[in-house]
Image (cartoon, rainbow, N blue to C red):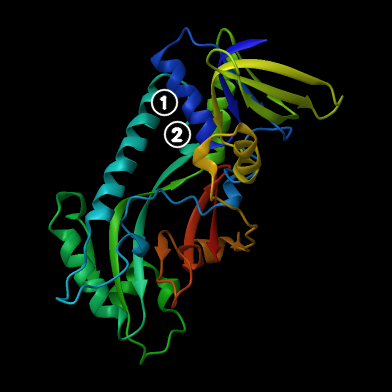
Amino acid sequence: MKTDVLLIGSGIMSSTLGVMLRELNPALSVQLFEVTEKPAQEASNGWNNAGTGHAGICELSYTPKQEEDGTVDVSKAISVFEDFEHSLQFWAHTARRGIIKDTRKCLNSLPHISLVHTQEQVPYLKARYEGLKKHHFFEPMRFSTDRKEIADWAPLLMKGRNEEQPVAATHMDGGTDVNFGEISRSFCQWIDEQENCRTQFGHRVVDLNKKTSGKGWIVTVRNEETCQKEKIHADFVFVGAGGGSLPLLQKSGIPEVSGYGGFPIGGQWMISRNPKVVAKHTAKVYGQALGAAPTMAVPHLDTRVIDGKQSLLFG
């Protein structure tokens, strides 16, 4: 079999690329292979990520430190905001085209809040706010050290908190909660409906080799139910297989993979669907990672909207 484009994985990366390429060139043939029985069951699944539309509003990791002169370099946050605007514009385009049928299932506007609670972090957050406020992207942002005002923004943040503990927060409307799984499913369905395109589930890519003569790749795919293998000739291959990407890239022989490694990461979320609790918090709140902890260790208190139902996530 021959295809112009072969996508490995059905998450947000592969499915987005598939839609983009077909929109740019409707003549392309596209094949997408996924080892699970349904699209977006792993990293892109709504419950396997925080669903934050990363726009640099509340994520302190984009502006990690205060300089010696007291300022905070906010250039990365500005760049991230612009990048996310491009994502929003693309999703708006796909909604107009009917690729995403109902944006309420995957995109919901929420305030984004940053919260700090140590003596050292309060001046840092104020300096960050002052730097961001100068750019028109962040003009609506507010800063406060007033406990009552912060409680008005997000009551659960202040409930039971030590009155002596210093606190500061920034608040900005217009942030986004994203269900990447829902977007991925919409994109995969659309790809499968296009002429000369198909999505196949329960199929694992087991080998990836560059052609010895001419351009392109030979991809070996195994049907997980029958164990039957098929070789597919592809002009272009995108590996979006999450944790399975590295072994495939190593098999491909491309020099760029040299020096990379992977390791498993585990984590847990606490989730509340109690309507009385959920009703008390409507925002995405990011704190500051402690010490040398990685950015994935940043504490969250997030509103999530999945399958049309609102819930509260902490982790």
Comparing 258 with 133, the one in front is: 258
**Residue 228 pos. (x, y %):** 84, 21
Q: Residue furthest front?
A: 212
| Cα–Cα span, label 2 and label 1 | 7 Å
Question: As shown in the figure, which amino acid type bears the numbered disc 2?
Answer: Thr
Q: Which residue is mark 2?
A: 103
Is residue 215 left or right of 120 when viewed as pictured?
Answer: right
Q: In the image, is residue 252 above or below residue 98? A: below
Q: Secondary structure at mark 2?
A: helix
Report whether residue 226 is seen: yes
Q: Residue at x 36, y 80 (%)?
A: 117
Q: In the image, is residue 104 above or below residue 170? A: above
Question: As shown in the figure, which amino acid type bears the numbered disc 1?
Answer: Ala
The numbered dot on residue 175 is: none
Q: Which residue is mark 1?
A: 95
Q: In the image, is residue 113 above or below residue 252? A: below
